Amino acid sequence: MHAEEVSGNSTNQLLESTLGQLLSSVRTADQVEELLTSVAHNPALLNSSEEGQIPRSMIAHAMNLLLLQDLLQRVPEGQTYVREKIIAGGKVVFDHGALRTVRWENQALPSGYKAFSRLLEPLGFELAGEYPLNKLNMCGFVYCHQDFPESIAQFFVSELYPEEFSEPFQAAVDRTVSTSVDPLTPGHLALLHKLSVNGWLSLGEAAELLPAIVACFDRQHAEPYRDDYLTLLKESAEMAWISTEGNAFNHGTDRVDDLKKLDAEQRTLGRPMKPEIEVAQNANILQTAYRATMVKRQFKTAEGLETFEVPGSFFEFIQRNHLDSKPEESKMDLRFDSRNAQGIFKMTRKH
């Protein structure tokens, strides 16, 4: 994040910006003000250079802000952290969001990560790397924005492979995801195609598309059977998590300058921190996180719907170093690390 991105505009300037107008079309004034004043923005993402045209980068940034807001509403620890950071005069530098998918054909959604490539690519994201998560029988697909790679949060879309597990597991997967529905209508897909071709939409079109693409980041299938959940949990805590949370943001991440300092500060405050910091093999990327928030979810049982407590989502922290010793002359290391990712994934296991 460049220095000019961190220095915020006045609240009125933010609200009156093109980005502010777009967000105001789908959220209340208070929600928009909270979004705009708590996150660092590249100035180029605030206003459109062409009258009446909302560029793909701005729609992507708006979507990311809404997804971060949704995550924080589900993760009280993250919400507290963000509020404390704002009070101290800082802003969140939204680095990336992560979600989980399952590669399975018997569902209304495109299988696995393709359910999200169909909307991320028209928004200007490109596949920047694949990260095998062999211990989990998964793979991570990273999408980075072509126009503003350091300023627009990336996506870590993981995909789980049921065929690597037992037949009872696969049957439980099928019963769970086969009830899914697709939140995108033909009209939404047409807008995504138009965005892909032109690189922009009108304000009205962007306002129509935005809630639909945000809705993709949710659970699209019905409540799982409790017995199926327990079957999945025996072999994959990640698939059990998908059965209750679906494609919701698994975590959102603040990019910080000194992760070790932040970790020590958060521990002093008594926050539910990960036991150790994950360090990439190249030492350029350091990550830690809060443990997942426990949430109550409904399950189908012989007695009808019953509520149980399960792990939900969490908030993460990352430090990204530059690719050489002169930050002003080099690019930030935007890569991920499979070992780090598998360590972070443990945060959604029951504790």
Image (spheres, helix red, strand yellow):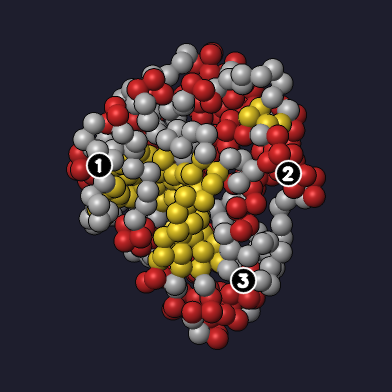
Q: Which residue is mark 2?
A: 193
Q: Amino acid at mark 1?
A: Leu
Q: Amino acid at mark 3?
A: Trp
Judge whether residue 151 can be spotted in this image: yes
Above-or-below relation of 12 to 77: above
Q: Quadrant of residue 180?
A: bottom right
Above-or-below relation of 141 to 48: below
Q: Amino acid at mark 2?
A: His
Of pointers 1 and 3, the one earlier in the residue sequence: 3
Asked whether 262 or 59 is in front, the reply is: 59
Above-or-below relation of 255 to 112: above
Element class at badge 3? loop
Q: Which residue is mark 1?
A: 259
Callout 1 touching callout 3 (CB < 8 Å): no
Q: Measuring 55% from the left and 86% from the top, which residue is drawn there?
A: 167
Q: Measuring 59% from the left and 25% from the top, which residue is drawn there?
A: 19
* Viewer-side label of 1, 3: 3
Element class at badge 1? helix
Q: CA distance from mark 2 to mark 3?
A: 25 Å
Q: Measuring 63% from the left and 79% from the top, which residue is drawn there?
A: 302
* Viewer-side label of 2, 3: 2
The image position of residue 214, as x and y in percent, is 62, 44
Asked whether 229 or 195 is in front, the reply is: 195
Judge whether residue 295 can be spotted in this image: no
Q: Which residue is mark 3?
A: 104
Of pointers 1 and 2, the one earlier in the residue sequence: 2
Callout 1 touching callout 2 (CB < 8 Å): no
Q: CA distance from mark 1 to mark 2?
A: 40 Å
Q: Quadrant of residue 124?
A: top right
Of pointers 2 and 3, the one earlier in the residue sequence: 3
